[in-house]
Amino acid sequence: MTVCKTIQECREARESLGKIAFVPTMGALHAGHVSLMQVARQRAPRVAVSIFVNPTQFGPGEDLTRYPRPVEQDLATCRDAGVDLVFSPDPAEMYPLGSPEIAIDLPQFTTVLEGRHRPGHFKGVCQIVAKLFNIVQPQVACFGQKDYQQLAIIQAMVKALDFPITIIPSPTIREPDGLAMSSRNRFLAPDERKRALSISRALFLARDEVAKGIRQTNRLIALMQQRILAPGQLGHIPVYIDYVAAVDPATFKPKEHVDGPILLAIATRVGNTRLIDNVVVEP
Ligand code: PAF
């Protein structure tokens, strides 16, 4: 496995690799990332992973400084997963002093849900993903459905800017009890983790209600909100809801009825940790 810190090293290492499937990450790798690497492996003879905590996608007061960076552990995970190339630059390599400001934006998708609650977040994501695509030059790139809106935005960006890259969506990987895997889960104290289970349980509850024939999304949203806010024995753990939404998975416009596929999406803060999750349900 070749590990590159600079853009030039990465370009040179990439040259001899032929067809590459790419998994961009911010590190703190978990089984969800490993499953993306496995999906990548099925799509191309060589797999590249980037590990970079991208400062431009964090807003003021967000968790950029405390975001975990277990570098050696991440490299071991990549090695075990049979990754060929890791690109792990420092922020100064990606954003040298004096770089001009640049923005790629797709406002139809970036002003709702995560975009509304994290202004500028998706501009930062598009900026870094476009840069990484230009540096790594993959033929295929894999993104998890846990960040459903990010995936849709990257697909739209690739189409709009004609990147010659196929985007492969990959399902959310969950802990055995249902909690969606996330690098931020490691911030959760044991009781917070138990409290965070209410997010996936709310989504599964709504999915079951749809299976039973409920079609009004306001009813589903109310049920999910109640499920998240019901503390049980864990009333000492504060939970704040950023949003509980039922939207069209292609346009992100709110839907009143489940008359086709619907994205149920939740963003909450459990203690100091912001968590998101989603499921797509169909009538
Ligand atoms: O999903 C992530 O980990 C990040 O948003 C990404 C795509 C690696 C860009 O920094």
Image: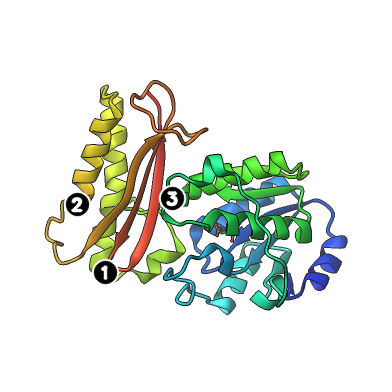
Image quadrant where one finds the C terminus: top left
Quadrant of picture, ligand 1: bottom right
Residue 188 percent location from the top left of the image: 32, 68
Mark 3 burial class by Cα count in 10 Å: few <14, some 14-19, many 20+: some
Q: Which residue is mark 1?
A: 190
Q: Judging from the image, what secondary structure is the residue with disc 1 in? A: helix
* Rendered residue at 28%/36% (across/down): 206
Image quadrant where one finds the N terminus: bottom right
Residue 62 percent location from the top left of the image: 43, 68
* Rendered residue at 41%/34% (across/down): 247
Hey, which quadrant is residue 34 in on the image? bottom right
**Could you say which disc has been placed on residue 116 in the image?**
3
* Rendered residue at 26%/57% (across/down): 240
Q: Marks 2 and 3, Cα distance to the nearest angstrom? A: 22 Å
Q: How many badges with numbers are in the image?
A: 3
Mark 1 burial class by Cα count in 10 Å: few <14, some 14-19, many 20+: few
Q: In the picture shown, does residue 63 fall above or below 268?
A: below
Q: Which residue is mark 2?
A: 229
Mark 2 burial class by Cα count in 10 Å: few <14, some 14-19, many 20+: some
Q: Judging from the image, what secondary structure is the residue with disc 3 in? A: helix
Residue 185 percent location from the top left of the image: 38, 64
Residue 173 seen in render: no
